[in-house]
Image: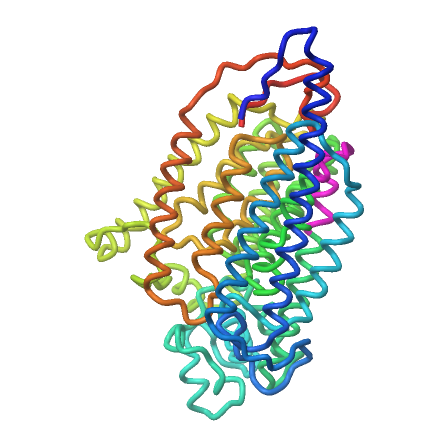
Amino acid sequence: MLILTGRFGDRGAAAAAGGRRGRVTGLLGLGLLGIGAAVFAAGMAAGPSGLVAHWGPDGPFLHWAAEPSRSTVTLMGRGAALCAGLGVVLVLWALRRGWSGVRPRVLLLAGALTAVLFALLPPSGSIDILNYAIYGRITDLGLDPYVTTPNELRSTGDPVGLLRPRAWAKQPTVYGPVATAAHALAAHLGGASMGWIVFWLKIGHLVAFLATAVMIDRLSGPEPAARVRAAVLWTANPLALFWMVASGHVDVLAAALLTGAVLLLAGRVRAGGAELGRGLAAGALAGAAVAAKVTFLFPVLGLALACLRRPRAVAAGALGAAATVAIGYLAAGRTAIASLTQRMAHDSDLFLPIPGLLRDRPTVYSATILLSTLATAAVLWWRLHRDTPPAAGRDLPLDARPLIAFAIACVVMSPVQYPWYDAAFLPLLVLLPLTRFDEALVVRGAVLSAVLLPGIGTPPSQYEAARVAVLLFSAALAVLCLFTVRPRTPAPADRVPGTGARGWQAHRG
C-alpha cells in the first residue's frame, strides 16, 4: 500500500476524511479481535471435541461437557480465526491512516487477561501439547526421550502413557534439550496426571507469552501507534493467544528467548566489557532458542547480521550461542544430536510440494531447504532495505531488516508450515515501521488457521487445502517482493505513525 497525498489545498480535508475512516476501521478491527477471542474461548470451554484434545479425567481446566459436534466447533474455530485475522488487518490499516485511538495499556491488559483465561481453558487446536507431556513424563521417569517412544511408555501401563496420541506414537521427541527440559519440569510438577502436566506446560507458555509481550512493547518505542501495532500483532492477537497459550506450542519458548536476545542487543551501546557482556548474554539466549527449536537458527543468523557494525558483540554472541547449544546437546546425550538430523517428515505434513527424489536423499533434501531459505531471506532483506529505515527511525544499535528477513524466510520456506510457526517473526516485526508484508503475513496465518481448524483429527483434505494456501501465499510474497511503487512525499497530516522523530521515511506496503 502506498500512502498517497493530494494537492496542498486538499490536505486538511483529506486528513479529516482519512481520520474518520481510520477511526471507524480501527474500532471495527478491535471489535473483531474481541469477537475472535470470545468465540475461541467458548469453543474451548465446551470441553472435549474436534477442537479440544482429550486430556484425561483430571486437571484444573475450566470447562463443561457440552459435547459439541465437529461441524459446530469447525464453524466456531474457523470463524474465530477469520475474525481475528481481519481484525488485525483492519487495525493495521487504521494505523496507516494515522489512527491510534486506543491506549496501548488497554490492549496490553486485555491481552494479558485473555492469555490467563486461555491458559485455564483446555488444550485446543492440536495434540502437540499432549506429546510434550508424554516426552516430559518419559524424561522424568529417567528414560531417554530421544530413544523411548510414547508406545513404549504406554506398554508399561503408565497412566500418562495410556493417553498418548496415536499420531506420534512411534516417534521419540524431535525437540531440543531446552524444550525437553521444560517438558520434564512440567511432568515433574504434574506427576502421573496428563491433565496436570499439560496445565503446567500451559503455565510455562503463558509466562513466555507475557514476557514476550512486555519485551516487544518496550522494543516498539515510545510512540503510542507503534505500541498499538505491537499489541495487535502479538499480545492482543487472538490467533497468537490461541496457538501460543491455548494450544500451547513450544515455539513460544523459543520466541521469548530470541526476543530477550534482541532486547539485550537493542539497548544503548556501551564500550568495553559491558558490550562484551551484553553480547555474551544475548548469544546465550539466542542459543537457548535454537536448543528449544532448531529452526530458530535462521533468525539467530539474521540477528548476527543485524549487528555487523558491532564486531565485539557479534563475537561474544557467537561464543555464547555456541556454548549454550553445545552444553545443551552434550548434556542431553548423543541420541539428542542424532535426532537433530533425523527429524521425521510425514507425507501428510508437508506443505510444500517436495519431490520424492529429494525426500529420499536426506543430505540433498536438507541442502535444498537450506539454500532456498537463504535465497528467500536475501530477497526479503533486499526488499526491506529498499522500503524501510534500519531501525524504525529510532536510535537502535542494530539493523533489524536481516533479522526479520531471515525470520520470515525460515517459516515460509519450511516444508511444514503450521500457523504457530509464525511466532518466529510476529514479535520481531515491531522493530520496523509498517512494512508491505504485515497484512499479508497476518492473512496467511489466519487462512492457514481456518483451513486446519478445528485441529483434532485433521483429515487429508484439510492438508491439501493448506498446501494450496501456502502456494498461493508464496506467489503473493514473490509479487510483494518484486513490485515497486514510486514513493511520494506525504503531507504532515498523512504521516504514518511509528517512524520516530527523525522525519518521514517513505513507506510502501
Task: Please provide the residue range marked out in magenta.
Answer: 212-228
Location of residue 92 in the rendering, given as x and y in whole percent from the top left corner: 62, 36
Q: Is residue 280 visible?
A: no
* Quarter of the image where one finds residue 91: top right
Relative vertical location of residue 249 with respect to residue 101 in this rendering, above or below: below
Q: Is residue 101 left or right of residue 130?
A: right
- Judging depth in this view, the residue of 36 and 172 nearest the camera is 36
Q: Main secondary structure of the magenta part?
A: helix
Q: Is residue 311 visible?
A: yes
Q: Is residue 201 left or right of residue 359?
A: right
Residue found 45% across the figure and 47% down from its top:
411
- Judging depth in this view, the residue of 325 and 231 nearest the camera is 231
Location of residue 443 in the rendering, given as x and y in whole percent from the top left corner: 50, 44
- Judging depth in this view, the residue of 352 and 122 nearest the camera is 122
The number of callouts visible is 0
Location of residue 99 in the rendering, given as x and y in whole percent from the top left corner: 72, 31
Residue farthest bottom in this picture: 157
**Magenta span contains residue 422:** no
Residue found 37% across the figure and 76% down from its top:
170
Which coloring applies here? Answer: rainbow
Q: Is residue 220 left or right of residue 322?
A: right
Location of residue 289 in the rendering, given as x and y in whole percent from the top left corner: 57, 53
Relative vertical location of residue 27 with respect to residue 185 in this rendering, above or below: above
